[in-house]
Image: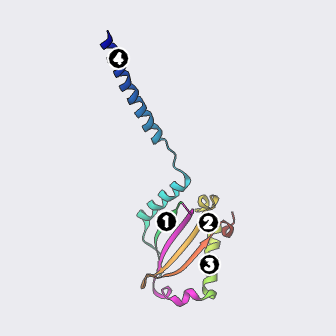
Amino acid sequence: MLWQHDIYVEFMKKVLAILCTGALLICGACKRETKDERFLHDLQLFTQKECPKFVDPNIRMDSICYDIGTRTRTEYYTVFNQLDKDSIYTNDALINPFREAIQKELKNSIQLKLYKDEGITFCYDYRSNTTGKKLLVLTFTKEDYGN
């Protein structure tokens, strides 16, 4: 009789181990993705599928990245032709209207509402095609796009 009890106990241990393993797998599968993780994943997919792409004849979007730590969404661009000159980016008379136009577009963007509702920082990074040098970085916080 004792050996039957030992077999029963071993059988129950195995069943319990299988049930616990299954419960852990189910709980792991149910883990909800945070908004930040979703932003990161969505922008990685966008970059894989859509980039690089020209937004106009002189500007190519290379990628969009998301930094969870700083909660910053960065769009990386390369500029060509007449926009690929250092002197343009040191001239406030040219840069300020450009910054204001991007800020206005950001404020009015319905597509970016989910990010704006979360107070995400938006960054636009422009680099030279000929030198690879960073020419201009524009950053907008929640205070800039007012939500």
The answer to which image quadrant residue 118 occupies is bottom right
Name the residue type under label 3: Arg
Answer whether labels 2 and 4 touch (C-beta < 8 Å).
no
Quadrant of the rendered structure where residue 7 is? top left
Sequence-first disc among 3 and 1: 1
The answer to whether 9 appears left or right of 34 in the picture is: left
Spatial CA distance of label 3 from label 4 is 74 Å
Query: How many residues crowd around disc 1 within 10 Å: few (fewer than 14), some, or many (20 or more)?
Result: some
Q: What element carries label 1?
A: strand
In the structure shown, which secondary structural element does the residue marked by tag 2 occupy? loop
Give the label, 2 or 4, closer to the camera: 4
Numbered badge on residue 99: 3
Query: Which range is magenta?
Result: 69-90
Which residue has dot 1 on it? 65
Q: Would you place residue 136 above or below residue 91 in this image?
A: above
Q: Is disc 4 in contact with disc 1, using a CB cutoff of under 8 Å?
A: no
Secondary structure of the residue carrying numbered label 4: helix
Mark 4 sits on what residue? 8
Residue 72 coordinates in the image, percent (x, y)? 56, 65
